[in-house]
Amino acid sequence: RLIRDSKNQLHLENETQLTLEYLSQQVQSLRNAIAVLSEILVQEMERRRRAEMQLNLGNSFSGASISSAWTDQPQGGPNSQGGGSRQQEEEQQKEDEEKRWRMRRLEKAMMKAQVGLKNLSSHMDSWSLQQAEEVKLLKSGHEST
């Protein structure tokens, strides 16, 4: 009975060790994926920031001066004939504001995702340490029997 119990214990320890090694590999794969995703998020946020700057630069040169010229004119002024252009400008401004709003939302979502990825990585680190401690305990328990 003692031999059978000992063999069962050894079998369980080997199985546990294999499971822990497998899980450690999975954790490492997740860490690698997190690193890649974090890098992609950083690149995407930078790309969005540049797009936002270009959008702002484009508006400051064209839209601001034209729209201020329209709004400074009284209703029956010389620009009243150019109603189509005014409507196009207003649509463009609305579209640009919508793009900015979407970019801000995407940036906030990306920052939340980045924080989430960092938290996940931190949890995986502590989990890995915990698993390493359990392996040490298993090995020391096996050696003492």
Image (cartoon, grey):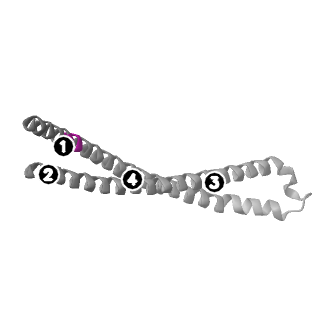
Location of mark 1 (residue): 17
Q: Position of residue 25 (x, y in %)?
A: 24, 44
Q: Are marks 1 and 2 in contact (CB under 8 Å)?
A: no
Q: Kindly state the secondary structure of the residue where label 3 is placed.
A: helix
Q: Earlier in the sequence, mark 3 or mark 4?
A: 3
Q: Is residue 3 left or right of residue 71?
A: left
Q: Residue at x 60, y 50 (%)?
A: 102
Q: Earlier in the sequence, mark 3 or mark 2?
A: 3
User: The disc labelled 1 sits on which kind of residue?
Assistant: Gln
- The quarter holding residue 42 reads bottom left
Q: Nearer the viewer, mark 3 or mark 2?
A: 2
| Closest to the observer, 8 or 38 | 8
User: The disc labelled 4 sits on which kind of residue?
Assistant: Leu
Q: CA distance from mark 2 to mark 4?
A: 31 Å
User: The disc labelled 3 sits on which kind of residue?
Assistant: Trp
User: The disc labelled 2 sits on which kind of residue?
Assistant: Gly
Please say if 22 is above or below 54. Answer: above
Q: CA distance from mark 3 to mark 2?
A: 59 Å
Q: CA distance from mark 3 to mark 4?
A: 28 Å
Q: Are marks 3 and 2 in contact (CB under 8 Å)?
A: no
Residue 17: in magenta span: yes
Location of mark 4 (residue): 120
Please say if 72 is above or below 110. Answer: below
**In this picture, which residue range is highlighted in magenta?**
16-20
Location of mark 2 (residue): 141
